[in-house]
Image (cartoon, coloured by chain):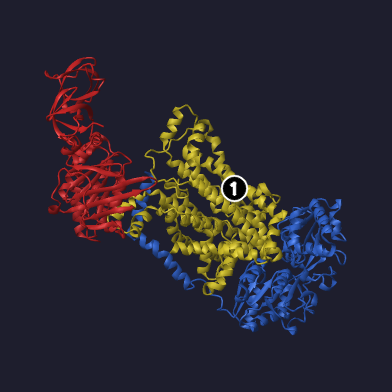
Amino acid sequence: MVPLDEHVRSYPVTDPKPATEQGLALQVRGLHRSYDAPVLRGLDLDVCQSDLVAVLGPSGCGKTTLLRTVAGFDHADAGTVALGGSFVDAPRVFVQPEHRKVGIVAQTGALFPHLSVARNIGYGLDRGRASHRRVDELLELVGLGGLGRRMPHELSGGQQQRVAVARALAPRPRLLLLDEPFAALDSTLRSSLRADVRDAIHAEGATAVLVTHDQDEALSMADQVAILQDGQVVQMAPPRQIYEEPVDLNVARSLGEAMVLPGRLTEGRVSTALGWLEVGHRSPAAAPGQPPDVLVLLRPEQLELDVASGVKCKVVSTAYFGHDGLIGLIPAAAGAGGLGLAARIMGPSRVPAVGEHVQVGVRGSVAVYPSA
Amino acid sequence: MGSVLSSSIFARLIGARRTVALIGIPLLTFGVAGCGAIGGGSGDADLTIYSGRAESLVADLITDFEDSSGLEVEVRYAETPELAAQLLEEGDSTSADVFYSQDGGALGALSKEGLFTKLPDDLISAVDPKYRATDSTWVGVSGRARVFVYNPDEVEPPKSVYELTGPEWAGKVGYAPTNASFQSFVTAMRVLAGEEKTREFLIGLKQNGKVYEDNGVTLDAVEAGEISLGLVNHYYLFERQAEAGDTPLNTQMAFAEPGDPSSLINVAGVGILEGSDDLEAAEEFVTYLLSDEGQQFFATTTFEYPLVAGIDAAEGVPPLSSIKGPKIDLSDLDDLQATQELLAEVGMI
Amino acid sequence: MPSLAAAGLTLLPLGYLARRATEQGWPVVTDLLGRQRTLELLGRSLLLAATVTLACIVVGVALAWLIVRTDLPFRRTWAVVAALPLAVPSYVAAFSWLAVDPGFEGFWAAAMVLTLCSYPYVYLPVAAALQRIDPALEEVSRSQGLSALGTFVRVQLPQLRFAATSGALLVATYTLSEFGAVSLLRYDTVTRGIYTSYRASFDRTPAAVYGCLLAAVTALIVFAEYRTRGRGRYFGNAPSRRPVVLRLRAWRWLAVALPLTLAALALAVPAMATVYWSAKGSSSAVWDEVITAGWTSLRFALYAGVACAFFAIPLGVLAARHRSWLSGLIEQVTWVVHSLPGLVIALSLVFFGIRLANPIYQQTPMLIIAYVVLFLPLAVGAIRASVAQSSPGLEEAARSLGDSARTAMRRITLPLALPGIGAGTALVMLATVKELPATILLRPTGADTLATQLWTATSVGRFAEAAPYAAAIVLVAAIPTLAISRWSRSTSTLEATQ
């Protein structure tokens, strides 16, 4: 392996972790890969030791290609991949998958059907007493203690994924790659499994990259979320920060429901159809000195109903989910131009009827972006 | 889940050593096989014979030869034409010393390709020149005559085979068109009478006749009364008679008038291969075949004609000299191709 | 490496044919090809191959459907019985029919005997595929108002296409190369022309030209089959539910007529003929010799099966995992060679063997090499299908856990493909037990197999002596046949990759 030379990161890192302190587990620089059309276009990604990074993007954005390249099942057309400071894929360098010490968890688990659970988990370990201990330890860790002798087909889908995670963790990989590991499971199973898998990864002190198209999964599991768009990482930040301060509106939309209102900036506040709002995050392009007309990002959970000081809106739709609900609204004031809003209300709140008029207020500060 | 289930059970059954077995078995196989686990290799024996004659006919003869000569003989049995083709491919590298052929045609073909060495004149001079190669490359060792076998209660035998196409023979004649001797007879007819006349004859025979798998079955059909007359080799009748013991058969044998192609004499013969590495042993074998002992074997065991003057055919078999077959050089019968095409054309084979 | 060695071996017969065909100059070749008889033979070969293949597809698919998808009485028994005709060599079947009726000959006779002997090549993979089709598809179709038959035609048949085509390829190449039955039943084909040319004129050129013609025709067929296979992938996502069984009601007992008739024609007729010969004839076989020959047959078959599997594993993996023009070409060449008559293969190996491998010429290893050249694609096909069934994701998981590509193959892919490897080995064993022309020319001197002993006895008309050998061939061949039917039920080992 070749020593790593320094490159400059080309995407905005809003929370620069002290890289020198923990060291980079994975460094991807300028990764290009095309099949019939370009899939990855100069992708950069840094993953620090012991971090769990979620790579979030729609299907077809290159997530799986990224994982396969890091794992060594695919190769870069251009760019470099380094693990723990050594190149594994660079010009004239290609380290075979089996020498990368990268564990993978596939979407379907890919358990070896002819091997028992214990032998699946112990697959990458040298045989011996130590390996038995390690297998038992991992079975406990993923909550499957005592099931080591089962065959894979005797397990439920969720259990199979737990085994897949345990198997990948067993040889203490430098990096764990998870390729949409919960996509094939039903939603109730998914959330508990997410928490368990995150805990298992943290308990092992492992570094992991999780690719997913599910923003809940990315935000709830990861230490850092990287947004992949058009074959590039456009932003990477801790979940809360990336949710509240996305670098642009596309990133904002990829992280959940987003409403965009036109507004006009004046002295740190912005005037919108919902009144004067506090500006929290300002994208650099909407900095002071730029034109005052901006776009304002609002999340449904920021809207409050029945606020005395609020703006009058008409309820056009309701969707009730039990734990919460989504209320569709149109500002009643003329000139608002049919602007569609959505407010998330908590379960126990009053659900207004369609056609009813309600006073709508905004909680917290908003992020602003340059218009057009 | 069926496939997953079964493969897991399979894997459990076979256990951890399966991969060793997967790789190991073929290597082991070749190892064992390579050591010559089966049979003696060619070259161990003093003499290797490629025999187109059936094992059941000549195995005893060869054992007798081994006993009298003290030589160890290896015989590879197959159909005469296949062996001829094999010898053509093997060329000089062949391990065969002697080719023992069912008919003269194959011997002629190999002789043409220069595969045979000349036989010493004193060895073969006892055989009538009619029954050996003019260039002494092969020699006939036993003969068989084409004959009519017929049921005398039903029909009188014809004077000529051409009569069999007449309406009075409809449904009464049996023959085996895939049999090599029958094809030799047709070849002889082509050589003697020409393509056109032969085609006419075959079409007529096909209309009147019934097809059988081989000579033996044809004879059985005459004996059983299915047909009245069959075109076969002479010795079948004597084999049957020997098997039947004293019980008289319903069938008798007849020859056509002299010169008729139906009375063709075919021979089985041998040639010594140019590539033979033990000429002496090979010549010893040919000598034995032409010795009194060898010739007697043909007369009494296979009911064929001995070809060396002075040895008589089996009792009841008409002497060879009495058969006035067509005047034809047996080496001319090596082109069966046109015969077979003709047979195919008229729909016999 | 082994795959290249095997590919090289299979090229030998083609090289031999090209050399022999052209040794008398091109005018002879063009003259032969231009002759009306050549075209006629080719036409007859193709007509027979097409008829037999079609009949096998109809019979095989119908039988598979009845056995897998209906409440046919005794279906488990029929599932086994239906595969057994594979154990009956076509020449034994032809002899048997001739014993029943000496006038049994010509096109329809040959077509019928060959269909009876080879329909299991279609039945087995189709039955396996039928078991895997998701029953939900049928239910949707039925709920859309289609009848059971309509559903079968419009929903199931298209999904069976790949299974049926791969079986059909086996049948077609087998029919083109078949000599014993067409010769006994007097139907002239290119293969028979090849034999006639050797037998009648001792002239190798026409035989070689016909051989090239046969190879060219097969190349077209194989190429067409290869194209229909497409680039799609199939990883065994077996349905979680058992296939739906259609109630035949009153038709139940009528439907039994099909498997019953087939069993009677394909199995009972040879059995009866064998008994008849034994009873009628005065000759008799020595039991010691039958047992010795049986053991020799079995041993050769075992060697051939294992050797073929050894060479076929890399080829099968290559074909399933790394499809390229080269792997495709290798696969197609092995099929083309498979369609050549055994005598041609044998003679080409005589030609090369005596020059290049004289120490093993007419020794067991040489004979095994001949079997490999003859039967390699049988094993490759089965192994390819079973490798394709296991997901490449499994190999990737193994590699991420520290296995090299080779180790992952050994620890994961091959164990999962074991049923396919087993079935491939069994198919080769089956074919080896029945093989005659190459065995006769290349066997070690004195090594008699059941097939050569059968030939020895029948060539002098000793049918009573032949009968036990015929029966023994069927019995010995029944062992791999049962293995195949067992393994192909759990996987689709005979089936092409979808």
Chain coloured blue in this rendering: B
Image quadrant occupied by the N terminus of chain B: top left
Which residue is painted at 20% across and 24% down in the image? A343
Residue A83 percent across, percent down from the top left: 23, 55
Which residue is painted at 20% across and 53% down in the image? A25
Residue C147 in the image: above or below residue A40: above
Query: Which residue position holds label 1?
Result: C115
Residue A4 vs residue B22, the one in the foreground: A4
Residue B218 in the image: above or below residue A295: below
Chain coloured red in this rendering: A
Residue C264 in the image: above or below residue A88: above
Residue B162 vs residue C248, the one in the foreground: B162
Q: Does residue C307 appear to the left or right of C189 in the view shown? A: left
Residue B262 vs residue C133, the one in the foreground: C133
Residue C184 percent across, percent down from the top left: 67, 55
Chain coloured yellow in this rendering: C
Question: Mark 1: which amino acid?
Answer: Thr
Which residue is painted at 53% across and 66% down in the image? C367
Image quadrant occupied by the C terminus of chain B: bottom right
Which residue is painted at 57% across and 54% down in the image? C219
